[in-house]
Image: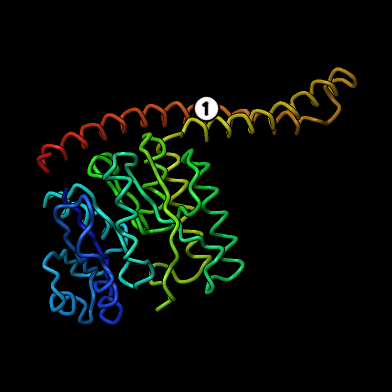
Amino acid sequence: MKVFIQIPCLNEEETLPAVLASIPREIDGVDELEILVVDDGSTDRTVEVARSLGVTHFVHHSRNMGLARSFRDGVDYALAHGADIVVNTDGDNQYPQDRIPDLVRPVIEGVADVVIADRQTATIAHFSPFKKLMQRLGSAVVNKAADTRLPDAASGFRAYSRTALYRLNIVTEFSYCMETIIQAGHKRLRIASVPVTTNAKTRESRLFKNIFHHMAKSGSAIVRSYLMFKPHMVFASLAAVFGLLALIPMVRFVILWALHGANDGNIQSLIFAAIMSVAALLSAALGVLSDLQRTNRVLLEDQLERIKQIQYGK
């Protein structure tokens, strides 16, 4: 059993030593434990510090590519070097690295494919009441989209089995957190949650400018991921809404026409009903096309999974 702990880093020379020092060097049931630093275009001494502290595995980006790309490239490197489990943590020392054994335990025991740390955001002192509310709301939205029951969907402290990583595909450029949960939920992967307590805040997040920027980016990722798996639900709902909006003025026009004749001046109701009917038909047609596209995506993902199995040799 080989475990890779990957640490995406962007200018983390000050906090990286604390992260590396707190990572356990042995885990029961694990034969090999490797540390991988994903340098996402750092301009400080992050790489030099990591090397001086014994890290030998690196992925380098010549410029900042974002968290999602860093996660994907790190996973590719880990799988290519024989990883059975990949743990993702952060370079800002937010997460308690001593809990890594608890993250990988359900995967080692074969009871989970993905394990996500629950930061228990309601207890985090530096989170404002508004941020705590948005964290709960965001997790609720993701759980609804993914058919899961996770208390902390935004947590990036996670463990993935090799099988799970074969089946998950990162397409967003912002953050992999929401996307992988929605994919894992719809692909019926087993997801577990482990409660942890976070370390003291060391710096502001570099992933987003403010909470509203984070909400907008996360919302976009959730919608895109949901549309990948259930496009027919979205377009069927739109068709139903437009159909109802067409039916009401249509019925009104027919009733008034029957009571007062064709010259009653309610032709605007008929025009509005016609516009809504066209919108309903277009939504239904888009639903059919998107569902066909979803079927094609499923077939392509099956091929990608097989390619990964051949590429990484397990």
Q: On the rendered image, what quadrant is the C terminus found in? A: top left
User: What amino acid is at disc 1?
Assistant: Ala
Would you place residue 35 above or below residue 181 in this image?
Answer: below
Tag 1 secondary structure: helix
Q: Residue 213 at x, y = what percent?
A: 49, 65
Q: Residue furthest right?
A: 260
Residue that label 1 marks: 284
Quarter of the view holding residue 242:
top right
Type of colouring? rainbow
Residue 22 relative to residue 132: left or right: left
In-front residue for pair 79/249: 79
Quarter of the view holding residue 252:
top right
Q: Residue at x 61, y 68 (%)?
A: 129
Residue 310 relative to residue 104: left or right: left
Q: Residue 166 at x, y = what percent?
A: 23, 41
Total marks placed: 1
Q: Residue at x 48, y 27 (%)?
A: 285
